[in-house]
Image (spheres, rainbow, N blue to C red):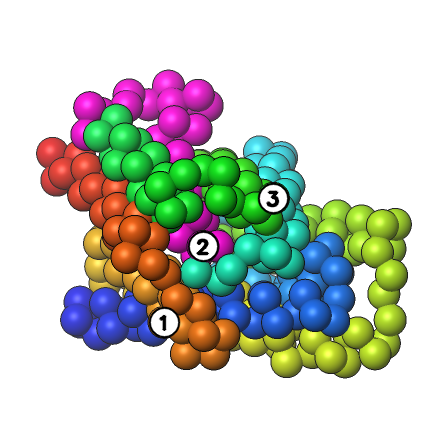
Amino acid sequence: MTRIRADLLLLACAAIWGFAFLFQKSAMNHIGPMTFVGTRALLATLVLMPLAWLEHRRAQVPIGGRYLRTGIFAGLAFVTGAVLQQTGLITASVTNTAFLTALYVVITPFISFALTGTRIAPLIWLAVMISFIGTWLLGGGTLTSFGIGDYLVALSAAFWALHMVIAGVAAPMGRSVLFSVLQFSVVALVALAGAFTFETITLAGLRGALPDILYVGVLSTAISFTILTFALRATSPSEAAIIVMMETLFAAFGAWLIFNERLSFTGALGAAAILSAAILVQLQQLRLNRK
């Protein structure tokens, strides 16, 4: 695979993930957040299982306890971030959700420092300042304009960052498809247990949300993950991260096209600032990789 083709595939993943926010929003008209997170994870697990089995048969090194523990912790971080984000989407706009979620890129270096002691570069602090200003502008020049849903989405960014750090620890262990099956199994188990405990699940609701579950569970999770795995063989992770971050723009475009959501001029400046801060963090990582 050529690098250009890999980058185009990554851009396709960004579009799939960006438009997934629309389906996540739509699903909240039919089912609860935990039900949606649990069913999408269960579907993704079932789709990825055959690939994981093929990967397992070809592997030479057996699975250890550290691998299993890492997968469980990744699943717990994922399900927490997903449920917070999904609950926030009940009231938050798709546009705000997409850009507030992008804050995870800026938060990731601090989570990495807390867990692994990785030094925080001065450029990261600049990105933090820019992202704070961007969040303030996204709220129209005040944080009080945000609703509870927006704050839940912003909080979910911390858990997405934690998940990224854990996934980074797992990457050298290999068997990436099996790792996804493991973590999505944990997500499905925890989310569905919460759904049966705190939410009302009906067949009518599941039927209504079925297109949303299929899109996010199969296309946005299982298929796009497989595309990402192949594309990363021909391009660098930092370059891939910058391309994939375009999902926020696809989400904003889809929200404008489908839900008629519009940002004010101030809000658009804020969204641009958050995206710029995220790109700044990735450029710093690319600089470190080159060194």
> Which residue is depicted at the point 55% across and 55% down?
92
Q: Does the magenta stretch include residue 106?
A: yes
Mark in front: 3 vs 1: 3
> Which residue is depicted at the point 27% across and 31% down?
129
* Secondary structure state at the residue bearing disc 1: helix
Query: Of the numbered discs in the image, which one, if any, rests on residue 195?
Result: none
Q: In which quarter of the image is the C terminus?
A: top left
The residue that mark 3 highlights is: 148
Which tag, 3 or 1, sits closer to the chain's start? 3
Q: Give the range drawn in magenta.
A: 96-123
- Amino acid type, residue under disc 1 in the picture: Phe
* Secondary structure state at the residue bearing disc 3: helix
Q: Residues within 10 Å of mark 1 (few under 14, many from 20)?
A: some
Tell me residue 249's x, y (percent).
33, 64
Query: Of the numbered discs in the image, which one, if any, rests on residue 96?
Result: 2
The residue that mark 1 highlights is: 253
User: Residue 45's image quarter?
Assistant: bottom right
Chief secondary structure of the magenta portion: helix
Q: Is residue 127 left or right of residue 267?
A: left
Tell me residue 77's x, y (percent).
59, 40
Position above or below: 194 against 234: above
Position above or below: 118 against 74: above
User: Residue 250's image quarter?
Assistant: bottom left
Q: Can residue 56 be seen in this view?
A: no
Which tag, 2 or 3, sits closer to the chain's start? 2
- Amino acid type, residue under disc 3 in the picture: Ile
* Secondary structure state at the residue bearing disc 2: helix
Instruction: Give yes or no for contact between labels 3 and 1 (Cβ–Cβ under 8 Å).
Output: no
Instruction: Give yes or no for contact between labels 2 and 3 (Cβ–Cβ under 8 Å).
Output: no
